[in-house]
Image: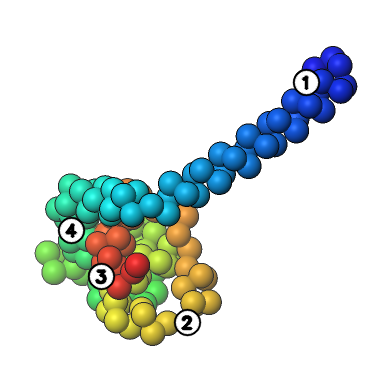
C-alpha cells in the first residue's frame, strides 16, 4: 500500500496490466510446439526413472491384497490365512477397506474405463502413502490420459 491514494491506484492499475501481459505471454509459451515437446520429454523421463519403483509398489500392494477384497468384510480379511500362512494385520485390512480407491488395484483397468465418472469420484483418495500412490499409478497408467 502507498500513502498517496492516487499513486496507489496507479500502482494497482499497472500491476493489473502487468499481470494480464504475463498471462498472455505464458499462454503463448505453453502453446508453442517446443514447449509441448519439452513437456512430453520431461514426462517420459519421469516415467522411465520411476517405472521400476512404481511396478515394485504395485507388486507390494498386490501381495497383501486378496483378489476378492470387495466382497470380504474387515473381519473376514483378518481371519483368512494368507498363502504364506500368516494373517493380514488389522490396520492394513482397515486401510484397504476404508481407502476404497486401493480396491481398484484388483479391478481390471478395462473395467474401470467402463465405470461411470460419478462412481470414480466417490472413491476416497486421501491418506495414500507414496507406495500406494505409485501402485495406483502403475495399475492405471495404460488407461489414463
* Residue 72 higher or lower than 144, as above or below: below
Is 100 left, or right, of 23 in this rendering?
left
The x, y position of residue 32, in whole percent, is 38, 52
Specify whether 57 is left or right of 16. Answer: left
* Residue matched to label 4: 55
Closer to the observer: label 1 or label 3? 1
Q: Residues within 10 Å of mark 4 (few under 14, many from 20)?
A: some
Find the distance from the CA under tag 3 to the CA under tag 2: 18 Å
Place residue 4 in its image quadrant. top right
Q: CA distance from mark 4 to mark 1?
A: 53 Å
Q: Secondary structure at mark 2?
A: loop
Task: Please tell me how crowded label 1 is: few (under 14), some (14-19), or many (20+) other residues with Cα within 10 Å.
Answer: few
The answer to which of 79 and 97 lies nearer the viewer is 97
Vertical arrangement, residue 6 with respect to residue 52, above or below? above
| Residue at the outermost top position | 3
Q: Which tag, 2 or 4, sits closer to the chain's start?
A: 4
C-alpha span from label 2 to label 4: 27 Å
In the displayed structure, does residue 144 sit left or right of residue 126?
Answer: left
Reply above or below: 138 against 32. Answer: below
Residue ID for mark 3: 142
Residue at numbered disc 2 = 116
How crowded pointer 2 is (Cα within 10 Å; few <14, some 14-19, many 20+) is rated as few
Q: Is residue 104 above or below residue 133?
A: below
Discs 2, 4 touching: Cβ within 8 Å? no
The N terminus lies in quadrant: top right
Of the image marks 4 and 1, the number of the one nearer the N terminus: 1
**Cβ–Cβ below 8 Å for labels 1 and 2?**
no
Residue annotated with mark 1: 1
Task: Tell me which residue sits at (53%, 77%) in the image.
Answer: 118
Q: Earlier in the sequence, mark 3 or mark 2?
A: 2
The structure's colour scheme is rainbow
* Residue depicted at 42% across the width and 82% down the height: 115
Amino acid at each position: 500500500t502507498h500513502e498517496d491514494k492516487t499513486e496507489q491506484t496507479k500502482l494497482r492499475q499497472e500491476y493489473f496490466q502487468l499481470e494480464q501481459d504475463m498471462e498472455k505471454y505464458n499462454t503463448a509459451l505453453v502453446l508453442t510446439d517446443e514447449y509441448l515437446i519439452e513437456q512430453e520429454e520431461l514426462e517420459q523421463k519421469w516415467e522411465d526413472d520411476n517405472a521400476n519403483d512404481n511396478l515394485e509398489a504395485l507388486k507390494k500392494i498386490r501381495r497383501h491384497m486378496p483378489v476378492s477384497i470387495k466382497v470380504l468384510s474387515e473381519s473376514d480379511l483378518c481371519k483368512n490365512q494368507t498363502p504364506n500362512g500368516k494373517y493380514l494385520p488389522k490396520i492394513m485390512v482397515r486401510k484397504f477397506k476404508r481407502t476404497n480407491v486401493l480396491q481398484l488395484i484388483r479391478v481390471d483397468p478395462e473395467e474401470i474405463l467402463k465405470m461411470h465418472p460419478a462412481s470414480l469420484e466417490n472413491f476416497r483418495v486421501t491418506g495414500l502413502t507414496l507406495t500406494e500412490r505409485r501402485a495406483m499409478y502403475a495399475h492405471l497408467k495404460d488407461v489414463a490420459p
